[in-house]
Image (cartoon, grey):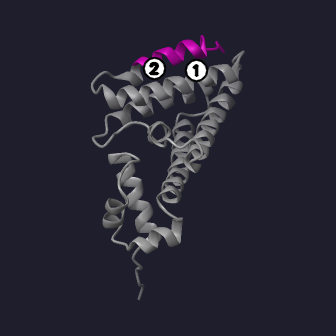
Amino acid sequence: MTTRTAPGPRERLLEAAKELTYRQGMGVGVDALLKAANVARRSLYEHFGGKDGLVTEVLRLTAAEDEAAYEQTMRAAGDDPRRRLLAVFDWLGEIIEEPDFRGCRYLAAELALTDPEHPGHAVTRRYRERVHDLLEAELRRLGHPRPAYAADQLLLLIDGTLAVGATRPGTHPAAAARQLAEQILGEPRRS
Protein backbone atom coordinates (compact mmCIF):
# COMPACT_ATOMS: atom_id res chain seq x y z
CA MET A 1 0.00 0.00 0.00
CA THR A 2 1.42 3.37 -0.99
CA THR A 3 0.42 6.61 0.54
CA ARG A 4 0.44 9.77 -1.47
CA THR A 5 1.29 12.87 0.45
CA ALA A 6 -0.22 16.14 -0.57
CA PRO A 7 2.13 19.05 -1.17
CA GLY A 8 2.89 20.96 2.00
CA PRO A 9 2.42 24.70 2.55
CA ARG A 10 5.89 25.57 1.18
CA GLU A 11 5.30 23.70 -2.09
CA ARG A 12 1.79 25.10 -2.46
CA LEU A 13 3.08 28.64 -1.94
CA LEU A 14 5.81 28.11 -4.53
CA GLU A 15 3.38 26.69 -7.08
CA ALA A 16 0.84 29.48 -6.50
CA ALA A 17 3.52 32.17 -6.72
CA LYS A 18 5.03 30.61 -9.83
CA GLU A 19 1.68 30.72 -11.59
CA LEU A 20 0.31 34.02 -10.29
CA THR A 21 3.48 36.10 -10.62
CA TYR A 22 3.74 34.98 -14.23
CA ARG A 23 0.09 35.42 -15.10
CA GLN A 24 -0.61 38.59 -13.07
CA GLY A 25 2.86 40.04 -12.53
CA MET A 26 5.11 40.58 -9.54
CA GLY A 27 2.60 42.97 -8.04
CA VAL A 28 0.17 40.16 -7.23
CA GLY A 29 -1.00 40.59 -3.67
CA VAL A 30 -0.07 38.45 -0.71
CA ASP A 31 -3.72 37.67 -0.02
CA ALA A 32 -4.16 36.28 -3.56
CA LEU A 33 -1.06 34.13 -3.13
CA LEU A 34 -2.24 32.81 0.23
CA LYS A 35 -5.69 32.06 -1.11
CA ALA A 36 -4.37 30.25 -4.20
CA ALA A 37 -1.99 28.20 -2.04
CA ASN A 38 -4.64 27.62 0.63
CA VAL A 39 -2.21 28.47 3.43
CA ALA A 40 -2.17 30.80 6.40
CA ARG A 41 -0.12 34.00 6.35
CA ARG A 42 2.15 32.50 8.98
CA SER A 43 3.32 29.85 6.48
CA LEU A 44 4.57 32.54 4.10
CA TYR A 45 6.73 34.09 6.82
CA GLU A 46 7.90 30.77 8.26
CA HIS A 47 9.06 29.41 4.92
CA PHE A 48 10.17 32.52 3.04
CA GLY A 49 10.33 35.45 5.45
CA GLY A 50 7.72 37.28 3.37
CA LYS A 51 6.72 37.90 -0.22
CA ASP A 52 10.20 39.04 -1.32
CA GLY A 53 11.68 35.74 -0.21
CA LEU A 54 8.93 33.80 -1.96
CA VAL A 55 9.38 35.74 -5.21
CA THR A 56 13.15 35.22 -5.06
CA GLU A 57 12.76 31.48 -4.53
CA VAL A 58 10.28 31.24 -7.43
CA LEU A 59 12.77 33.05 -9.68
CA ARG A 60 15.54 30.71 -8.55
CA LEU A 61 13.46 27.59 -9.25
CA THR A 62 12.14 28.75 -12.61
CA ALA A 63 15.61 29.89 -13.67
CA ALA A 64 16.92 26.38 -13.09
CA GLU A 65 14.00 24.92 -15.06
CA ASP A 66 14.46 27.37 -17.92
CA GLU A 67 18.23 26.85 -18.11
CA ALA A 68 17.58 23.12 -18.36
CA ALA A 69 15.09 23.80 -21.16
CA TYR A 70 17.72 25.76 -23.11
CA GLU A 71 20.19 22.92 -22.65
CA GLN A 72 17.62 20.30 -23.66
CA THR A 73 16.62 22.29 -26.75
CA MET A 74 20.22 22.58 -27.86
CA ARG A 75 20.99 18.93 -27.09
CA ALA A 76 17.95 17.79 -29.09
CA ALA A 77 19.25 19.71 -32.12
CA GLY A 78 22.30 17.44 -32.40
CA ASP A 79 26.01 18.16 -32.27
CA ASP A 80 26.36 21.02 -34.75
CA PRO A 81 26.72 24.29 -32.77
CA ARG A 82 25.04 26.33 -35.50
CA ARG A 83 21.97 24.09 -35.50
CA ARG A 84 21.95 24.08 -31.69
CA LEU A 85 21.94 27.88 -31.51
CA LEU A 86 19.29 28.30 -34.19
CA ALA A 87 17.13 25.68 -32.47
CA VAL A 88 16.76 28.11 -29.58
CA PHE A 89 14.82 30.48 -31.82
CA ASP A 90 12.63 27.70 -33.18
CA TRP A 91 11.85 26.71 -29.58
CA LEU A 92 11.06 30.32 -28.65
CA GLY A 93 8.64 30.44 -31.57
CA GLU A 94 6.81 27.46 -30.08
CA ILE A 95 6.74 29.00 -26.61
CA ILE A 96 5.30 32.27 -27.90
CA GLU A 97 2.43 30.41 -29.54
CA GLU A 98 1.36 28.79 -26.27
CA PRO A 99 -1.96 30.24 -25.06
CA ASP A 100 -0.64 31.09 -21.59
CA PHE A 101 2.49 32.88 -22.84
CA ARG A 102 3.01 36.19 -21.02
CA GLY A 103 6.57 37.08 -21.96
CA CYS A 104 9.84 36.70 -20.14
CA ARG A 105 9.41 36.15 -16.41
CA TYR A 106 12.88 37.57 -15.71
CA LEU A 107 12.51 40.76 -17.72
CA ALA A 108 9.13 41.33 -16.08
CA ALA A 109 10.69 40.80 -12.66
CA GLU A 110 13.54 43.21 -13.40
CA LEU A 111 11.05 45.90 -14.40
CA ALA A 112 8.59 45.28 -11.56
CA LEU A 113 11.01 44.92 -8.65
CA THR A 114 11.72 48.60 -8.14
CA ASP A 115 13.98 48.16 -5.11
CA PRO A 116 17.48 47.76 -6.58
CA GLU A 117 18.45 45.72 -3.50
CA HIS A 118 15.64 43.17 -3.97
CA PRO A 119 17.32 39.73 -3.93
CA GLY A 120 15.37 38.75 -7.05
CA HIS A 121 17.64 40.98 -9.14
CA ALA A 122 20.67 38.85 -8.31
CA VAL A 123 18.77 35.75 -9.42
CA THR A 124 17.68 37.24 -12.75
CA ARG A 125 21.18 38.59 -13.46
CA ARG A 126 22.75 35.21 -12.73
CA TYR A 127 20.16 33.48 -14.93
CA ARG A 128 21.05 35.74 -17.85
CA GLU A 129 24.75 35.13 -17.24
CA ARG A 130 24.24 31.37 -17.39
CA VAL A 131 22.20 31.58 -20.61
CA HIS A 132 24.91 33.85 -22.02
CA ASP A 133 27.53 31.27 -21.03
CA LEU A 134 25.59 28.51 -22.82
CA LEU A 135 25.39 30.60 -25.97
CA GLU A 136 29.03 31.64 -25.77
CA ALA A 137 30.19 28.04 -25.35
CA GLU A 138 28.34 27.06 -28.54
CA LEU A 139 29.76 30.05 -30.37
CA ARG A 140 33.26 29.00 -29.33
CA ARG A 141 32.56 25.48 -30.63
CA LEU A 142 31.38 27.09 -33.86
CA GLY A 143 34.68 28.98 -34.12
CA HIS A 144 33.03 32.40 -34.04
CA PRO A 145 35.67 35.17 -33.99
CA ARG A 146 33.91 37.12 -31.20
CA PRO A 147 31.96 34.57 -29.14
CA ALA A 148 31.25 36.74 -26.09
CA TYR A 149 30.02 39.65 -28.20
CA ALA A 150 27.94 37.38 -30.41
CA ALA A 151 26.41 35.81 -27.28
CA ASP A 152 25.46 39.33 -26.15
CA GLN A 153 23.77 39.83 -29.50
CA LEU A 154 21.92 36.51 -29.36
CA LEU A 155 20.74 37.23 -25.83
CA LEU A 156 19.42 40.59 -27.04
CA LEU A 157 17.53 38.78 -29.80
CA ILE A 158 16.12 36.32 -27.26
CA ASP A 159 14.94 39.13 -24.97
CA GLY A 160 13.43 41.00 -27.91
CA THR A 161 11.72 37.89 -29.21
CA LEU A 162 10.06 37.24 -25.86
CA ALA A 163 9.07 40.89 -25.37
CA VAL A 164 7.56 41.25 -28.85
CA GLY A 165 5.92 37.85 -28.56
CA ALA A 166 4.10 39.07 -25.45
CA THR A 167 3.18 42.53 -26.69
CA ARG A 168 2.48 41.99 -30.39
CA PRO A 169 0.87 38.61 -30.94
CA GLY A 170 0.86 37.26 -34.46
CA THR A 171 4.04 39.05 -35.54
CA HIS A 172 6.30 35.95 -35.50
CA PRO A 173 9.31 37.59 -33.82
CA ALA A 174 11.12 34.27 -33.37
CA ALA A 175 11.35 33.75 -37.14
CA ALA A 176 12.71 37.27 -37.63
CA ALA A 177 15.16 36.81 -34.74
CA ARG A 178 16.30 33.50 -36.21
CA GLN A 179 17.19 35.23 -39.49
CA LEU A 180 19.18 37.84 -37.60
CA ALA A 181 20.85 35.10 -35.56
CA GLU A 182 21.95 33.44 -38.81
CA GLN A 183 23.73 36.66 -39.74
CA ILE A 184 25.44 36.82 -36.33
CA LEU A 185 26.59 33.21 -36.71
CA GLY A 186 28.03 33.86 -40.16
CA GLU A 187 28.21 31.48 -43.08
CA PRO A 188 28.07 27.78 -42.31
CA ARG A 189 31.39 25.97 -42.55
CA ARG A 190 31.88 23.80 -45.60
CA SER A 191 33.09 20.29 -44.88
* Position above or below: 183 against 5: above
SS for tag 1? helix
Q: How many marks?
A: 2
Check disc 1 and report the residue beneath it: 153
1 displayed left or right of 138: left
Please say whether residue 126 is visible from this viewpoint: yes
Quarter of the image for the C terminus: give it.
top right
Judge by depth and name the residue closer to the eye, 38 or 52.
52
SS for tag 2? helix
Type of residue at label 1?
Gln
- Range of magenta residues: 176-191
Query: How far, Cα to Cα, is label 1 from label 2?
Result: 11 Å
Residue 35 x %, y % = 31, 66
For this orientation, the residue located farthest to the front is 115
The residue at the point 62 percent across, 30 percent down is: 135
Corner quadrant of residue 121 = top right
Type of residue at label 2?
Ala
Residue 71's disc is none
Residue 92 x %, y % = 43, 32
Check disc 2 and report the residue beneath it: 177
Quarter of the image for the N terminus: give it.
bottom left
Corner quadrant of residue 134 = top right
The residue at the point 46 percent across, 20 percent down is: 178
